[in-house]
């Protein structure tokens, strides 16, 4: 088809811009700043490049980089996560009921399973972005800044700051050990143990380090970071126990590794030896799709003064597991 002026009319492309760019730094790119490189080689705007870098969506050789002026070296691999303006990372959205507390400086969210604490290489929705979208939909200032992290599969109380000053104050409180946290953990008891033999309360104090055998895993390591968790058994069944966990330090996978090292892996936590299903004596079976760990409560100094205490209700899958176990005699 030709236009009235005789030119051939090209069909308008319906192709959407990519949500992720993978680029490699060549010799001719030596000395380019990261943001400028992404613009030149990725075909995106400087605004888009800087936005991705600032929110933690840009990686060099797999390592997150926040410096838009970082000078590049030939051979480096750049991974850039983008999203369309005003669009959440995926179609998922947080329901307003997920807000546990909100004021001018702090917002507490009941994090669902499957949501990342921050944007990562694996993709998927991240909590700060989803929270920002929820606040914007409510007509509020949409700033939601990361303060601490829950694992992707963990549910429950998560604090985010609404100002930079509040973020700094909360980060300092977490670093200083001034935040009290309580988790609920549904654990498997090995067949050679009896739930009735578990002590009502116990403490695990094991330093943790990286497990070089499995990327992303942690393991007990005398040369690692000091870690201490108090535990209290709430309910017992022959092969399952509901345990409250009170971490006194904040190491990656701390509760999961401390429980597994004590012979009590989380149900659904295959990474650390937990079974992905539970059965009853009557033959009924319940499949588990995530590690059964829930951040039930958190108490922290409020940036404006005083104390903030937030609690989260038990999630539906944990309630379903407890209802399933109700048909099993307790020990």
Image (tube, helix red, strand yellow):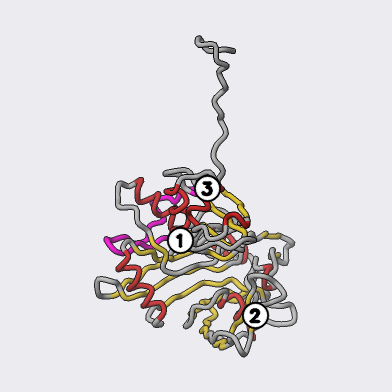
- In the rendered structure, which disc, 2 or 3, sits on the residue that comes first in sequence? 3
Q: Nearer the viewer, residue 198 or 135?
A: 135
Circle 1 or circle 2, nearest the eye? 1
- In the rendered structure, which disc, 3 or 1, sits on the residue that comes first in sequence? 3
Q: Which numbered tag is attached to residue 147? A: none
Is-magenta flag for residue 99? yes
Left or right of 108? Residue 240 is right
Q: Residue at x 61, y 81 (%)?
A: 209
Label 2: how many Cα within 10 Å (few below 14, some 14–19, many 20+) = many
Q: Which residue is mark 3?
A: 40
Region in magenta: 89-110
- In the rendered structure, which disc, 1 or 2, sits on the residue that comes first in sequence? 1
Q: Residue at x 42, y 44 (%)?
A: 86
Q: Position of residue 298 (x, y in %)?
A: 40, 72
Circle 2 or circle 3, nearest the eye? 3
Give how far apart the Cα atoms at labels 1 and 2 are: 36 Å
Q: Residue at x 64, y 59 (%)?
A: 289
Q: Nearer the viewer, residue 52 or 75?
A: 75
Left or right of 193? Residue 242 is left
Residue 75 location, quadrant: bottom right
Label 3: how many Cα within 10 Å (few below 14, some 14–19, many 20+) = few
Is-magenta flag for residue 225? no
Q: Which residue is mark 2?
A: 219
Count of marks placed on residues: 3
Q: Quadrant of the C terminus?
A: bottom right
The answer to whether residue 235 shows anywhere in this view is no
Q: Which numbered tag is attached to residue 69? A: 1
The relative height of residue 172 versus residue 82 in the rendered view (above or below) is below
Q: Nearer the viewer, residue 4 or 251?
A: 4
Give how far apart the Cα atoms at labels 2 and 3 are: 43 Å
Q: Nearer the viewer, residue 253 or 299?
A: 253
């Amino acid at each position: 088809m030709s236009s009235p002026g005789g030119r051939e009319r090209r069909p308008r492309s319906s192709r959407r811009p990519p949500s992720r760019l993978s680029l490699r730094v060549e010799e001719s790119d030596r000395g380019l700043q990261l943001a400028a490189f992404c613009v030149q080689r990725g075909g995106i705007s400087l605004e888009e490049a800087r936005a991705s870098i600032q929110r933690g969506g840009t990686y060099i050789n797999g390592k997150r980089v926040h410096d838009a002026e970082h000078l590049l070296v030939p051979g480096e691999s750049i991974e850039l996560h983008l999203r369309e303006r005003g669009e959440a990372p995926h179609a998922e959205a947080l329901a307003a009921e997920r807000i546990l507390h909100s004021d001018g400086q702090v917002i507490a969210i009941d994090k669902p399973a499957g949501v990342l604490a921050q944007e990562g290489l694996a993709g998927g929705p991240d909590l700060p972005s989803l929270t920002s979208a929820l606040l914007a939909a409510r007509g509020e200032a949409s700033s939601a800044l990361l303060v601490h992290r829950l694992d992707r599969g963990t549910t429950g109380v998560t604090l985010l700051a609404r100002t930079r000053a509040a973020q700094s104050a909360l980060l300092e409180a977490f670093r200083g050990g001034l935040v009290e946290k309580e988790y609920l953990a549904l654990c498997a008891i090995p067949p050679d143990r009896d739930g009735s033999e578990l002590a009502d309360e116990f403490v695990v104090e094991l330093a943790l380090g990286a497990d070089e055998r499995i990327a992303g895993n942690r393991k007990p390591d005398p040369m690692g970071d000091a870690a201490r968790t108090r535990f209290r058994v709430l309910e017992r069944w022959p092969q399952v126990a509901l345990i409250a966990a009170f971490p006194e330090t904040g190491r990656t996978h701390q509760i999961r590794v401390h429980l597994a090292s004590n012979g009590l892996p989380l149900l659904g936590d295959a990474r650390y030896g937990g079974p992905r299903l539970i059965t009853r004596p009557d033959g009924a079976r319940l499949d588990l799709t995530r590690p059964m760990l829930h951040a039930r409560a958190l108490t922290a100094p409020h940036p404006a003064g005083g104390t903030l205490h937030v609690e989260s209700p038990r999630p539906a899958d944990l309630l379903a597991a407890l209802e399933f176990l109700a048909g099993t005699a307790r020990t």
